[in-house]
Image (tube, helix red, strand yellow):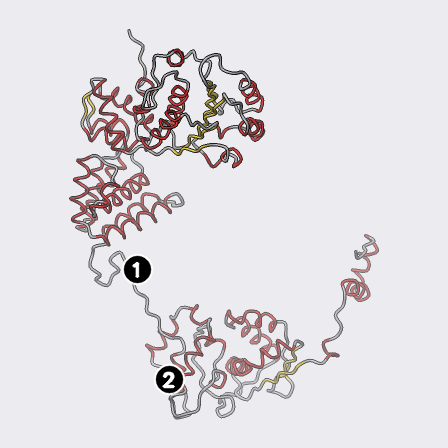
């Protein structure tokens, strides 16, 4: 029985022309061999399975060939080529940096660079996965890489170029390998299938190529697996069953049903996919990729961006003709948002179902219930009642309509906070009426009104109109209402409100109130809102004769600020318990 060799090894390229998907790069290497202009260090970087190490071996073989062809390929007949083919060459060394990443391994390799080749032109050192070297190994390698012997060439290969030191990168010629396209992988798999006497349909090879994600080695490994499962006869149904891939027909049907707003049919498709063991997140990702392909199929110029087989390309073009561009844009946005929220979701299936329902509702007419769109919010101005008050000619308190009152109570609280900007809008309107301009304070607007309180709006002026109530109030009631007023003040005045909470209004000549302010800046701020403070207390205490007087405290009233030590000593004198505790533990202020 012949020894079985996997396709990735059996069909590994032996010449530059056999390398798939890297024509520009291999042409550059062949020209270097022909001209003899060789660098002392090369860096091959790119995704896995695209031919980095393979090209390094072919290049090493070609530069040591005694008689390379006119196209830059190795002759395969000289002593150097035969030694390489038989894996007995002493001029080509390979090091796997993933398992030999210590500084001792690099030092041992550097010692071998000092010995010239016994036959051939160069000693070639291929270091695979070079990004795995330790920092100490990189530093040990750096000096030799900078000034290597004339007979030494280094070829480094890596999948993660960003992990390599800039000092290493600057000393190498860098070659970036590309991902292999789906069509290139399909063509190569057709060649392998014909040599292995495997029958196939193109859709099955397209599934394998898409699953490989740009890597030829992965594609050949998946191909071997599928051939074993299908017993040499590759069909689309068997391949997707073997690779556990969701049938693309699900995606085509979901989009068709979404255009027709058939939510029930989409839910049945989702349930069928989940019953077969497919994850909801996988379906969302696959559907997003499908919608992207449909969008690419809308324009002839973007058709080459479709990485699919010929049959599926035709299907995408047919579906693209039926899908409006706005539908595709909106669907992509919804699916992307679902993908972002999927991991954090506690009920993942519900999230997927809601997402598919929203996609199915994109083309529904806007009948007022949302139709998959957010409702339009129309918010009225909070101070609309102030503009109405400016036109009132009588001194009677206007009674708002029930409907307008309910609307004002439901307005978002955030609109109440920006008092200054709203008043700026009101003043130009108020100036157009026959009466003098009305200020906010003169209308007796309370802090409860500004915060959207449930009490009626008071439209009495401080000087001309008085509240008819004359209810007696006590000092305790005054202090309570003062604290409640501070809590109701707008968020834009939160700093002033906090400092006002620490103040204590005093009844002097009942019902007049005096308020002593110990800070000049705070005093100036409170002067500006004095009318609103007065109106709030009048309404809260039900006394229209109440008047508040603000006064800036003198230096004697403010008093001297005590230090920590002085406050502690004062506590010792006033509190015997503290004094006893101090003596017991021998406490000292640091």
| Label 1 residue SS | loop
Labels 2 and 1: the sequence-earlier one: 1
Visible in this render: residue 13? no
Q: Name the foreground residue: 554 vs 166.
A: 166
Q: What residue would you read off at disc 2?
A: 388
Q: Is residue 588 left or right of residue 465?
A: right
The quarter of the picture where residue 70 lies is top left
| Label 2 residue SS | helix
Residue 25: give x, y in percent of width and height: 35, 31
Residue 31: give x, y in percent of width and height: 36, 28
Residue 319 - label: none
Q: Work out which quarter of the rendered image holds the C terminus and state it.
A: bottom right
Q: Is residue 316 left or right of residue 119?
A: left
**Measuring 55% from the left and 81% from the top, which residue is drawn there?**
528
Q: Name the foreground residue: 344 vs 28.
A: 28
Residue 188: give x, y in percent of width and height: 25, 26
Q: Are marks 2 and 1 in contact (CB under 8 Å)?
A: no
User: Above or below — where is 261 with respect to 477?
Assistant: above
Q: What residue would you read off at disc 1?
A: 374
Residue closest to the far top:
1
Residue 350: give x, y in percent of width and height: 31, 46
Visible in this render: residue 398? yes
Crowd tier of the residue under label 2, counting other residues whose Cα lies within 10 Å: few below 14, some 14–19, many 20 or above:
few
User: Above or below — where is 107 with respect to 347?
Assistant: above
**Measuring 59% from the left and 84% from the top, which residue is drawn there?**
548
**Distance between the Cα atoms at labels 2 and 1?**
33 Å
Q: Work out which quarter of the rendered image holds the N terminus and state it.
A: top left
């Amino acid at each position: 029985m012949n020894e079985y060799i996997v396709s990735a090894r059996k069909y590994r390229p032996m010449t530059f022309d056999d390398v798939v998907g890297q024509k520009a790069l291999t042409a550059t290497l062949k020209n270097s061999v022909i001209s003899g202009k060789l660098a002392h260090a090369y860096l091959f970087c790119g995704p896995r399975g695209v031919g980095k190490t393979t090209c390094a071996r072919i290049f090493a073989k070609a530069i040591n060939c005694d008689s390379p062809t006119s196209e830059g390929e190795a002759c395969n007949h000289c002593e150097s080529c035969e030694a390489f083919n038989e894996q007995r060459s002493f001029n080509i060394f390979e090091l796997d940096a993933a398992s030999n990443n210590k500084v001792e391994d690099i030092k041992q390799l550097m010692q071998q660079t000092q010995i010239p080749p016994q036959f051939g032109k160069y000693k070639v050192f291929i270091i695979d996965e070079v990004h795995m070297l330790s920092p100490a190994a990189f530093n040990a390698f750096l000096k030799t890489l900078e000034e290597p012997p004339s007979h030494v060439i280094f070829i480094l290969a890596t999948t993660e170029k960003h992990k390599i030191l800039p000092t290493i990168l600057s000393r190498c010629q860098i070659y970036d390998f590309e991902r292999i396209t789906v069509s290139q992988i399909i063509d190569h798999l057709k060649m392998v299938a014909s040599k292995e006497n495997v029958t196939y349909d193109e859709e099955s090879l397209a599934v394998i190529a898409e699953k490989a994600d740009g890597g030829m080695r992965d594609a050949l490994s998946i191909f071997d697996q599928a051939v074993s499962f299908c017993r040499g006869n590759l069909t689309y149904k068997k391949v997707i069953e073997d690779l556990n891939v969701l049938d693309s027909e699900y995606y085509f049907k979901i989009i068709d049903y979404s255009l027709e707003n058939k939510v029930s049919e989409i839910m049945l498709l989702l349930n069928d996919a989940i019953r077969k063991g497919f994850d909801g997140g996988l379906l969302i990702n696959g559907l997003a990729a499908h919608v992207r392909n449909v969008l690419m199929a809308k324009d002839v110029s973007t058709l080459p961006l479709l990485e699919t087989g010929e049959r599926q390309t035709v299907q995408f073009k047919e579906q693209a003709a039926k899908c409006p561009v706005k539908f595709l844009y909106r669907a992509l946005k919804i699916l992307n948002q679902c993908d972002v929220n999927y991991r954090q979701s506690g009920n993942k299936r519900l999230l997927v179902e809601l997402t598919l329902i929203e996609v199915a509702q994109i083309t529904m007419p806007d009948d007022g219930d949302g139709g998959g769109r957010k409702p339009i919010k129309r918010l009225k101005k909070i101070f609309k009642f102030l503009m109405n008050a400016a036109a009132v000619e009588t001194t009677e308190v206007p009674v708002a309509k029930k409907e307008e009152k309910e609307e004002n109570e439901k307005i978002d609280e955030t609109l109440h906070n920006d008092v200054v900007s709203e008043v700026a809008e009101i003043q130009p309107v108020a100036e157009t009426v026959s009466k003098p301009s009305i200020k906010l304070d003169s209308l007796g607007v309370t802090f409860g009104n500004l915060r959207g309180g449930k009490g009626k709006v008071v439209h009495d002026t401080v000087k001309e109109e008085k509240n008819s109530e004359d209810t007696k109030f006590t000092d305790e009631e005054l202090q309570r209402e003062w604290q409640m007023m501070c809590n109701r003040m707008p968020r834009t005045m939160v700093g002033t409100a906090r400092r006002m909470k620490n103040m204590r209004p005093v009844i002097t000549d009942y019902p007049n109130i005096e308020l002593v302010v110990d800070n000049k800046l705070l005093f100036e701020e409170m002067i500006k809102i004095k009318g609103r403070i007065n109106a709030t207390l009048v309404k809260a205490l039900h006394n229209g004769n109440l008047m508040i007087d603000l006064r800036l405290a003198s230096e004697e009233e403010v008093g001297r600020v005590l230090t920590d030590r002085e406050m502690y000593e004062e506590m010792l004198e006033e509190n015997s318990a503290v004094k006893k505790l101090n003596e017991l533990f021998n406490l000292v202020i640091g």
